[in-house]
Image: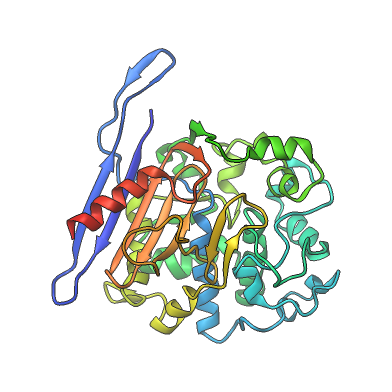
Amino acid sequence: MRASSACARCSRPGSRAARSWARRCASTSTAGRSSTCGEASPTRTAGLRGATKGITALCAHQLVERGELNLDAPVARYWPEFAQNGKAELPVRLLLSHRAGLPAIAKPLAPADIFDWGTMTTALAEQKPWWTPGTKHGYHAITYGWLVGELVRRVSGMSIGRYVREHVSAPLGAEFWIGLPAELDARTADLVQGPIVTGDGPNMMEIIAKDPEGMLAKTFANPMLFAISPNSRDWRAAELAAANGHTTGHALARIYAALAQGGTLDSVRILGREAIERARVVQSEGQDAVLPMVTRFGLGFMVPPDQEPLGPNPRVFGHGGAGGSLGLADPEARIGFGYVMNRMHTGLWLVDPRPRALLDALYASL
């Protein structure tokens, strides 16, 4: 069975807050039987993959706003071991904007190492940048979580999972987990692979196979992610701040609705307007050094490039994830949008066609 859900929360100046829900579910066949699911339950969670990064970025911005983390200070001020291999002066903002040159770890790692926070952060502290930091950008698909998450841990004294629970999820009443409790497995949808659209673009798996020691291979296959089930208890329990958030469409939309409305929702403040504006200022744009496509980033959030606009406002911000998930804030239209699914579609796009179609319908209805 597959289920997908999206929620958009919007409020217009001069009117009461309004909610617009859109859910879509289609039939599929499993083990020879055909089944059709109805509305996706707003209480059923699923994994997000890369869309987790936006919530991790929010945590960092809270620390910046409180004066506990300085975007222009060296990372090594907070994480002394990070100074190795020429990184002593590398500033915090380069981690958030994917310009640090640390999308991958060169030394071989075992699949299980991905679950050991200390092993991964130690390896990144030792790693020499793959390019001169600040000279270009490339998607830090997995390492972003340890890089930014370790800063959150060093500054706040909390693991990224605990920080999210105490400073984002609980205050907003929005169920979002980095490190899913075992008791929630029963209402968490398994991720299943759907269609893979290769098109005419480069085949990333072929590139990885041809150059197993290259940066792209090390980004996605060291540790060997393909050998780990995203439905396993080990994966769900781990705090992978770039890749294994678990949430619902409603909760994801609620978090981004707060950011779309100046940082406050239902009298709960999670970030100020100045911090939100700073977060969505473009830091990186152009050809990505890791992905074979054009990307654009603010400070921790994706900003849609001209080639893949998301609605009429070019300054929307949020984050998508492999398979199709998407969280988005549009402060100009006062819209927060969340899309969570368990049937993963794969293609050379930044935003899956399914949430894009829902967004188009949402904007058309305004």
Q: Quadrant of residue 146?
A: bottom right
Expressed as whole percent of the image width and height from the top left, the position of residue 142 reads: 64, 53
Expressed as whole percent of the image width and height from the top left, the position of residue 290 reads: 66, 53
In the rendered image, which quarter contains the N terminus? top left
70 on left or right of 8: right
Reply above or below: 128 against 44: below
Q: Residue visible at 40% across and 58% down?
A: 309
Reply above or below: 313 against 310: below
Give the total of numbered labels. 0
Q: Residue visible at 58% across and 63% down?
A: 286
Question: Which residue is the extreme one toward the bottom?
Answer: 67
Q: Quadrant of residue 96?
A: bottom right
Q: Nearer the viewer, residue 160 or 254?
A: 254
Expressed as whole percent of the image width and height from the top left, the position of residue 201 reads: 58, 40
Q: Nearer the viewer, residue 241 or 275?
A: 275
86 on left or right of 209: right
- The colour mode here is rainbow
In the rendered image, which quarter contains the C terminus? bottom left
Q: Residue visible at 32% across and 21% down?
A: 35
Q: Quadrant of residue 235?
A: top right
154 on left or right of 318: right
Question: Which residue is the extreme one toward the top?
Answer: 32
Question: Which residue is the extreme one toward the left?
Answer: 15
Expressed as whole percent of the image width and height from the top left, the position of residue 114 reads: 70, 48
